[in-house]
Amino acid sequence: MKILLFGVSNVGKTTCAKLLAEKIGYTFYDLDEEVKKALHTTLEDFINNTPTLYQRDQIRGQIIKKIVNRTDKIVFAITPMTYIDSIQDILKRKNVLAIELRDTPENIFIRLVFSDENDVIYEDRDYCEKYKDHYLNEIRSDIEWYGHIYENIGYKYFIDGRSPQEVVEDLFKSYPLKMNK
């Protein structure tokens, strides 16, 4: 089985995917990391040097296909993508379980992190609080936008502020996941 976790930025895809992969003995993949590996670049350079969102999503789609087609038993954290046409065939496969992780803007805001030009992730709570209204509006916009993009993803999971460990336990109980141990 191939499990793909979708959702907006900072909803918890990577953390939950990593924990879920560990729990069921699958291999973990993160699309951002795979893009950096495949292109030998930083995410900042990838965004700056690939002119359009469509082109970036096509490249992401090629990387997803390559990994999904060559590897069994994976949990894959998928970067938010607007143009998912290139992976529609994957999403329809019987051995693919695609789940969109959802949460409230307020809960996502609590998890908000940033990355610098070298892809080093950091938190800045003072900055977040100073621009809280702005970030909450951005998160709301993302939820609305990607909600339309991901409407055909059959499984939706509402995190409701739970810890990643609680989410993984619930995903394990709620979906047809098999342990590989």
Image (cartoon, rainbow, N blue to C red):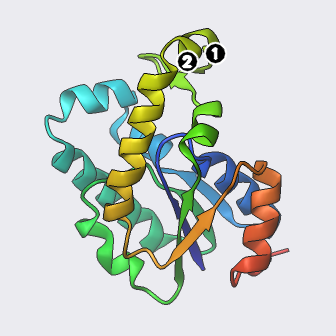
Name the side, left or right, on which 104 lies relative to 55. right
Name the side, left or right, on which 16 lies relative to 89. right
**Residue 128: mark:** 2
Closer to us: 140 or 7: 140
State whether residue 13 is above or below residue 44. Answer: below
Q: Position of residue 36 (x, y in %)?
A: 42, 37
Task: Kindly report the distance in space between the C-alpha atoms of the residues bearing marks 2 and 1.
Answer: 5 Å
State whether residue 162 is above or below residue 179. Answer: above
Closer to us: 133 or 92: 133
Closer to us: 70 or 163: 163
Q: Quadrant of the C terminus?
A: bottom right
- Label 1 sits on what residue type? Arg
Name the side, left or right, on which 77 lies relative to 165. left
User: What residue is rendered at 60% in x and 80% in y?
Assistant: 1
- Label 2 sits on what residue type? Cys
Name the quadrant containing residue 140. top left
Whether residues under marks 2 and 1 lie with C-beta atoms below 8 angstroms apart, the answer is yes
Q: Position of residue 60 (x, y in %)?
A: 33, 52
Q: Position of residue 40 (x, y in %)?
A: 37, 33
Mark 1 is surrounded, within 10 Å at the Cα level, by few (under 14), some (14 to 19) or many (20 or more) other residues, namely some
Callout 2 secondary element: helix
The furthest residue to the left: 51
The residue at which mark 1 appears reads as: 125
The furthest residue to the front: 133
Name the quadrant containing residue 76. bottom right
Q: Position of residue 92 (x, y in %)?
A: 39, 84
User: What residue is rendered at 46% in x and 18% in y?
Assistant: 118
User: What residue is rendered at 56% in x and 57% in y?
Assistant: 102
Callout 1 secondary element: helix
